[in-house]
């Protein structure tokens, strides 16, 4: 919504779309020839790859503003090799825009309308400049209600001396080092949050499962979600039933794999993000 409204204010023609119906969107890209994309990086990669497969390359796209999930350096380099210049913005549904990437890099510039602190994960003690902690945001004048030290659950750090050293683009506000992980077990899969409570909900539906751990793997832009289960029985019927529960609860497709009893780590975690972000 922020991107579409801003683009209209600049006089741009906007073609609203969304995740899904990939072939139709590739055809629309080939016909309408847009020059810019706004959305998740994983879906942009999917569109470009599908365009190659269909013989209709999305060659008009030259720049993109992405958000909603991590953009590892390897995926950024992949886009650059395709001639697409990608920059990131960071925000939440509750706060709106928090920070954004600009020309010249050197961190994400914090938006002037919010107050950002980096605190001890799960606590309230401010972290020293440059050290990693949880992002908390204060918004006083968003027109609806104030948010005081709203916890995003994301990890980041303030770029050292960014309050004294302006960004190469000229902005003078403090800058964040980028997204450095989550302070809790929640993680994003294909742009959607998956929470430990959802995993617990799936387990309650299937008492045959004694223990489980949701493991997220895959290359950038190609997430794979696998529920590894220790169960009293291991058969195709249970495997299909659990996979269906994953789709119903999380609105995402996932694989189900049975593992030996006692093989899962005993660390209290229900979700493990095993993706690489380098």
Image: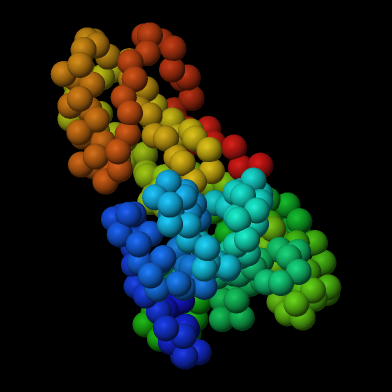
User: How was the colour assigned to the protein in this rendering?
Assistant: rainbow
| Residue at (54% x, 51% y) in the render | 70
| Residue at (37% x, 22% y) in the render | 228
Residue 172, visible in the rendered structure: no
Name the image quarter holding the N terminus. bottom left
Name the image quarter holding the C terminus. top right
Residue 250, how many percent across, how many down? 28, 43
Residue 145, visible in the rendered structure: yes
Q: Is 272 situated left or right of 197 in this image?
A: right
Position above or below: 55 against 216 = below
| Residue at (71% x, 77% y) in the render | 173
Q: Is 133 situated left or right of 91 in this image?
A: right
| Residue at (30% x, 59% y) in the render | 24
As rendered, which of 81 and 239 lies closer to the eye?
81
Position above or below: 245 against 262 = below
How many tags in the picture?
0
The image quarter containing residue 174 is bottom right
The outermost residue toward the front is: 55
Residue 48, how many percent across, how many down? 48, 54
Position above or below: 114 against 188 = below
Residue 238, how many percent across, how many down? 19, 19
The image quarter containing residue 106 is bottom right
As rendered, which of 19 and 131 lies closer to the eye?
19
Residue 195, how many percent across, how many down? 37, 44
The image quarter containing residue 201 is top left
């Amino acid at each position: 919504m922020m991107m579409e409204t801003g683009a209209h204010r600049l006089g741009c023609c906007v073609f609203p779309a969304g995740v899904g119906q990939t072939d139709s969107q590739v055809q629309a890209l080939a016909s309408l020839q847009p020059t810019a994309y706004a959305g998740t990086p994983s879906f942009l990669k999917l569109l470009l790859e599908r365009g190659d497969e269909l013989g209709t390359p999305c060659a008009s796209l030259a720049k993109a503003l992405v958000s909603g999930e991590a953009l590892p350096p390897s995926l950024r380099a992949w886009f650059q090799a395709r001639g697409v210049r990608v920059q990131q913005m960071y925000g939440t549904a509750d706060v709106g825009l928090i920070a954004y990437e600009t020309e010249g890099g050197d961190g994400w510039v914090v938006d002037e309308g919010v107050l950002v602190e980096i605190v001890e994960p799960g606590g309230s003690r401010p972290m020293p400049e440059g050290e990693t902690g949880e992002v908390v945001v204060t918004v006083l004048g968003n027109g609806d209600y104030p948010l005081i030290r709203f916890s995003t659950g994301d990890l980041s750090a303030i770029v050292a001396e960014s309050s004294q050293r302006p960004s190469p683009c000229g902005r003078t506000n403090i800058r964040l080092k980028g997204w450095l992980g989550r302070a809790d077990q929640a993680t994003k899969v294909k742009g959607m949050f998956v929470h430990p409570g959802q995993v617990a909900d799936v387990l309650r539906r299937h008492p045959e499962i004694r223990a489980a751990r949701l493991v997220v793997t895959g290359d950038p832009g190609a997430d794979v979600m696998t529920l590894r289960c220790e169960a009293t029985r291991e058969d195709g019927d249970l495997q299909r039933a659990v996979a269906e529960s994953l789709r119903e609860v999380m609105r995402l497709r996932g694989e189900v794999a049975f593992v030996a009893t006692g093989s899962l780590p005993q660390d209290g975690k229900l979700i493990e993000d095993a993706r690489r972000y380098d």
